[in-house]
């Protein structure tokens, strides 16, 4: 725990000093999130619960997942990961510390944009599960994707399939009546997160919160299990 706190503090310092990384990880997702809120306020077609799901999936995808993958690939290229392994810190602590800033930034963005949402009457349990489970699975998938990302510049390419699965799943669930969203659809993390926000907003016909959470956590566990086997700590020569 002490090693994780020290390393996470160092990661926050490096994030603060990198204007480009901070803008890409914070400004762009916030801008897209604001666009989703504006579109919903203008048209009202999706409904507040579904719009909140699309907003949350966008933040999780761009900040926790894409930025997390880029961070790990960058630390490997800088030989930071290799040096940290010789410091006595455990492998999970090193990876968790590197992914803490993207996770915390995603949570802060969600809290900031929630000010624009009407949370009266919202069930906070499913909403909190959507946020935390979504961030967890995104960070786990970031560690897995980083194993196949040889340079931070390639993260925009290697993250595309899973990013499309996040965003595509959210859009698929958004276009599907809540009662028709089955467990097979919630295998896509974006669909599971969107369904949880619908449950939080008490959208008629929405259900299956336990299944959605179980599938999100199952995806995270599977991603971590594979990542621990294939993750590369050194640059491939």
Image: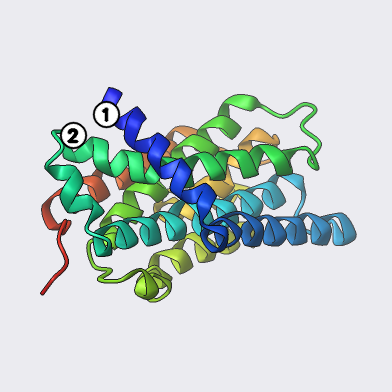
Q: Residue most toward the front?
A: 17
Location of residue 25 by image quarter? bottom right
Relative to 32, is 146 on the left or the right?
left
Compare marks 2 and 1 and give the one earlier in the sequence.
1
Picture quarter with the C terminus? bottom left
Residue 221 is situated, as x and y percent measured from the top left of the image, at 26, 42
Q: Which residue is drawn at 78% across and 37% down?
A: 115
Q: Does residue 142 appear in the picture of this structure? A: yes
Scheme of colours in the image: rainbow
Relative to 230, is 132 on the left or the right?
right
Contact, mark 2 vs mark 1 (Cβ under 8 Å): yes
Measured in 3D between alpha carbons, the distance from the residue under mark 2 to the one under mark 1, in whole angstroms, is 6 Å
Q: Residue at x 22, y 38 (%)?
A: 92
Q: Which residue is drawn at 11% across and 52% down?
A: 229
Q: Which residue is drawn at 26% across and 56% down?
A: 144
Q: Residue 3 carries which label?
A: 1
Q: What element carries label 1?
A: helix
Location of residue 123 by image quarter? top right
């Amino acid at each position: 725990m002490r090693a994780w706190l020290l390393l996470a503090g160092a990661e926050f310092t490096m994030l603060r000093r990198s204007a480009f990384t901070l803008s890409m990880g914070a400004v762009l997702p916030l801008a897209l999130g604001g666009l989703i809120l504006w579109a919903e306020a203008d048209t009202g077609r999706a409904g507040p619960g579904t719009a909140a799901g699309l907003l949350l999936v966008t933040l999780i995808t761009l900040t926790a997942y894409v930025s997390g993958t880029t961070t790990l690939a960058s630390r490997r290229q800088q030989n930071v990961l290799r040096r940290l392994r010789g410091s006595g810190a455990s492998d999970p602590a090193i990876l968790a510390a590197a992914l803490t800033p993207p996770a915390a930034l995603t949570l802060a963005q969600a809290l900031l944009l929630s000010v624009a949402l009407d949370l009266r009457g919202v069930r906070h349990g499913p909403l909190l599960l959507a946020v935390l489970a979504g961030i967890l699975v995104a960070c786990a998938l970031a560690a897995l994707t980083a194993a196949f990302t040889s340079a931070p510049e390639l993260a925009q390419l290697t993250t595309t399939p899973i990013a499309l699965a996040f965003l595509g799943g959210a859009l698929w669930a958004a276009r599907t009546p809540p009662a028709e969203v089955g467990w097979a659809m919630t295998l896509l993390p974006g669909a599971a997160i969107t369904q949880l926000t619908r449950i939080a907003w008490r959208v008629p016909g929405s259900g299956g919160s336990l299944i959605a959470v179980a599938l999100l956590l199952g995806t995270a566990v599977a991603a971590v299990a594979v990542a621990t086997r294939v993750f590369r700590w050194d640059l491939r020569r």
